[in-house]
Structure formats: structure tokens, C-alpha cells
Image (cartoon, rainbow, N blue to C red):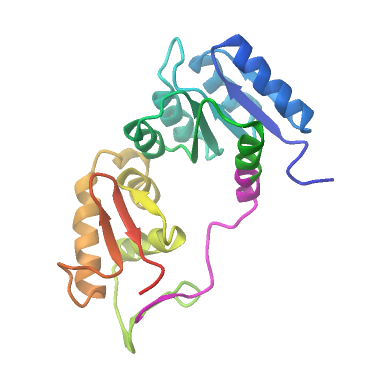
């Protein structure tokens, strides 16, 4: 049996026609579909039914979908795919900041959304810890030995600095938002403490970059977060 099938998908969508269409698509593709027409019901079902993936509309009648994302993320690591008519980049960034894993804009193609769901399900079985060394330029991070080297020189990092660097390595090449880093390194109670990330990123650059003011590896994405380069 295909491991991506026989999974439970929760659809949180207030528009009945869209909700039924999504559920029909999921059932036809071999999934079990759960329905919620409000954010409150969706959060409750997420806790009680423990779905494998959540499809979430942002324009809900009782709670905005962004806040639903935050509340779900406080209690569960279930992959959340936002399916919304909101196409502004700011909305997408906010949803990802609050803990969404992916964002699909309406109208969408069924095949694309199903592919995104398969990716989310495959991620469920992936270990969060990494063991293979990450190398870019003269920077080497070896999680198995918990060693960080610049050239042939080993760099001593504090536990928090190391956790922050490892969070960047896990998402190497991708933009990682301030709140994603705060959630992973400090925990959900620190999501407003953006200065923490800035201070520790500055310390990391001082230890890892030849020119900290003009970093080659740990790059700033203005107003969003950071990106770890995957090629020198």
C-alpha cells in the first residue's frame, strides 16, 4: 500500500462547496477526509482526531486562519498547508511565521495540491536530527560529532549558538523566518523576541564569517529572516 494513502486529512474551510470539493478530491485519492467549517471546530478536531495533515483556509467566520495556525502549532507539529485566496506575499510570510508548512493560493490545481500533501506526509517520517556533515566553502558543520570548523580551525559555540546554526543547516538554502527560528531554538513562548535571533546571529557571524559585516554564509533576508547559503 502506498504509504501516503490511508492518511487522515483535516479540511478547515467555511465555504461548503469548496470544503466538499476538497474532501471529495481527497477521498478519490485514497485519503480519509475530516471536515471543519470553523476555526474553533478545526482546532478541536486537530486535538481529538490527530490528523496527518491540515488544509486550512484563512478566511474563517470565527477565528482568522493565522490565529488558528498559531493555536494548532502550540499543541501539535502536524503539517499545515494553507489553502487561501489571499495572494499577498505579506499574508504568506505571516502564515509561515505562525507555523504553516506550505501555502497554496486559490484557485489551485488538484494535482498540485495533492503533490504538496504527499510532500507533507513524506516529511512525517523524516528524522528531525541530521547526521551528515554540512559543508559550504570553508565552513563545516558535523552534527554527528557536534563539531564546527572554519577551515582547519574548530570553533567553540555556546549551546544556543549551536542550536541556531543547526536550525539553519536543517533548512540550508531556504529562507527561515525569525519566528521559525525562535520556535525551534527558544520555544513557542518566545515568538515575539526577534532581538534574540538578531543578537545570536551576530555572534555566529563573528565566529564563522571572515567579514561578519558582509557575511558570505549566513545571509539576511530583510524583514523576514535568514538564509544559509548552500554554495560558496
Q: Quadrant of residue 64?
A: top left
Magenta stretch: includes residue 120: yes
- The quarter in which the C terminus is drawn is bottom left
Where residue 48 appears, as percent x and y from the top left, is 62, 24
| Residue that lies at the very extreme toward the right in this rendered image | 1
Say whether residue 34 is visible: no
* Residue lying furthest bottom: 152
Q: Is residue 3 left or right of residue 70?
A: right
Image quadrant holding the N terminus, namely top right
**Quick check: can you spot residue 119?**
yes
Residue 118 placed where, x, y %?
66, 43
Q: Is residue 93 above or below residue 150?
A: above
- State the image coordinates of residue 89 (x, y, percent, origin top left): 35, 35
Residue 113 versus residue 46: which sits nearer the camera? 113
Magenta span covers which residues? 119-138
Which residue is found at the position 46% from the left and 37% from the top? 100
| Residue 28, quarter of the rendered image | top right
Comparing 215 with 79, the one in front is 215
Q: Is residue 187 left or right of residue 145?
A: left
Q: Is residue 193 magenta?
A: no
Residue at screen point 39% across, 35% down: 92
Residue 179 position (above or below residue 199)? above
Compare residues 159 and 64 and report the one nearer the observer: 64
Residue at the spot 39% in from the left edge and 72% down from the top edge: 231
In the rendered image, the vertical position of residue 193 relative to residue 43, given as above or below: below
Amino acid at each position: 500500500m502506498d504509504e501516503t494513502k490511508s492518511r487522515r486529512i483535516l479540511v478547515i474551510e467555511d465555504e461548503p462547496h469548496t470544503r466538499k470539493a476538497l474532501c471529495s478530491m481527497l477521498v478519490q485519492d485514497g485519503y480519509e477526509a475530516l471536515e471543519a467549517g470553523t476555526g474553533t471546530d478545526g482546532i478541536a478536531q486537530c486535538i481529538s482526531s490527530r490528523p496527518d495533515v491540515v488544509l486550512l483556509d484563512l478566511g474563517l467566520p470565527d477565528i482568522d486562519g493565522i490565529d488558528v495556525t498559531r493555536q494548532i502549532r502550540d499543541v501539535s507539529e502536524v503539517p499545515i498547508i494553507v489553502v487561501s485566496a489571499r495572494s499577498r506575499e505579506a499574508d504568506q510570510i505571516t502564515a509561515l511565521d505562525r507555523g504553516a508548512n506550505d501555502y497554496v493560493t486559490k484557485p489551485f490545481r488538484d494535482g498540485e495540491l495533492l503533490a504538496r500533501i504527499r510532500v507533507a506526509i513524506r516529511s512525517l517520517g523524516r528524522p528531525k536530527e541530521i547526521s551528515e556533515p554540512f559543508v559550504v566553502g570553508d565552513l563545516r558543520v558535523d552534527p554527528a560529532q557536534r563539531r564546527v570548523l572554519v577551515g582547519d580551525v574548530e570553533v567553540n559555540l555556546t549551546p544556543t549558538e549551536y542550536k541556531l546554526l543547526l536550525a539553519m543547516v536543517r533548512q540550508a538554502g531556504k529562507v527561515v523566518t525569525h519566528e521559525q527560528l525562535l520556535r525551534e531554538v527558544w520555544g513557542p513562548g518566545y515568538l515575539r523576541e526577534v532581538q534574540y535571533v538578531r543578537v545570536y546571529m551576530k555572534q555566529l557571524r563573528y565566529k564563522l564569517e571572515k567579514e561578519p559585516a558582509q557575511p558570505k554564509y549566513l545571509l539576511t533576508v530583510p524583514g523576514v529572516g535568514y538564509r544559509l547559503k548552500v554554495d560558496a
